[in-house]
Amino acid sequence: MSAFVVGLTGGVASGKSEAGRCFEALGIAVADADQAARDAVAIGSDGLADVVDMFGAGVLAADGSLDRPAMRRRVFADPDARKRLEGIIHPRVRELLHATCAKATTPYAIAAVPLLAEGGGRQAYPWLRRILVVDVPESVQLQRLLQRDGIDELLARRMIEVQAARRQRLAIADDVLVNDGSLDALGEKVAALDRLYRGLAQQDGAA
C-alpha cells in the first residue's frame, strides 16, 4: 500500500497530464480525478442516482448514462447548479482517489487532480503528503490552447479565467514543475521529482 501520496495539479494546458504519464513511465501509480469523476456517476451508481434525483431524468442520455454535454451546458450557465453537482461528485471523487492510491503497490502514488485548488486544496485532501503544481505562464497556456483545441482566443481566455488563478495554485504547492520547455526537459524534471518522492516515501515508511 502507498501511504505517501502526491497531489498533481496545474492549470488547463499546463502539461499536467503529460507529467502524469512521465511518472507512470517511471513505474509510479497515478490515480486520475477525471476517471474517478466518470466512475462516480457511472450507470447504476449511487452518484448517478443522486444526480437524477436532484436534476431530473432529463440529464440522462438514451442509454441511461449521464448526458455530459447537456449537463455541462446547464452548470456552465447556472453557478448554483454547478455547486449542487459538485456537492454530489467531488466527495465521491476524493473517496475513489484515496482508495485507489491506498491500494497502489508502488513506492508512492500520484493523485492527479486538475481542480485541486478549486476543490478545497489541502483541507479537502488532508491525506496528500505533498502537492506538485505544474506551472506555466498564462501566455504559454493561451498558445497551447489555441494550438491544441483549435479554438478562438476569446474562448481560450475564458477557459483560463474560470479556473483558479495561477497564484492560488502556487500558494498550495510544495513543489513547482515549470513546464515551458520540451517533452525531454519535462521528463528530466519529473525524474528528479521521482527521486525526491521515493526518498521521502522511504523516510516516511521508516518513521
Image (spheres, helix red, strand yellow):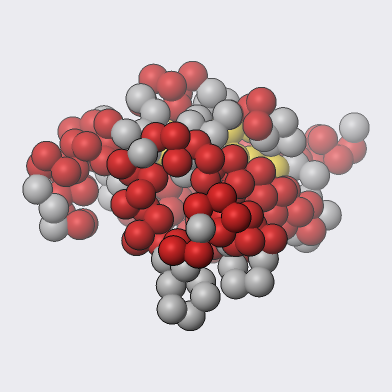
Give the number of marks.
0
* Residue 148 image position (x, y, % from top left): 21, 57
Which residue is found at the position 43% from the left and 72% from the top? 61
Say which residue appears at 50% left-offset and 36% top-offset: 83
Q: In this view, does 2 lie to the left or right of 113?
A: right
- In the rendering, at what x and y percent does residue 169 appear? 45, 27
Residue name at image x 35 percent, y 49 percent: 74
Quadrant where the image shows the N terminus: bottom right
In depth, the one of 92 and 149 nearer the eye is 92
Q: Which residue lies furthest to the right in this view?
A: 207
Residue 156 sits above or below residue 184 on the image: above
Relative to 188, is 142 on the left or the right?
left
Q: Residue furthest bottom?
A: 63
Q: In this view, does 94 lie above or below 122?
A: below
Residue 80 left/right relative to 51: left
Q: Position of residue 163 (x, y in %)?
A: 36, 34
> Where does residue 184 sit, x and y in percent of width and height?
35, 53
54 w.r.t. 161: above or below:
below
Q: Is residue 155 above or below residue 120?
A: below
Q: Which of 146 and 28 is in front in this view?
A: 146
Say whether residue 33 is visible: no
**Residue ID at (52%, 45%):** 85
Q: Could you say which is closer to the camera, residue 3 or residue 159?
A: 159
Residue 115 shows in the view: yes
> What quarter of the picture does the C terminus occupy?
top right
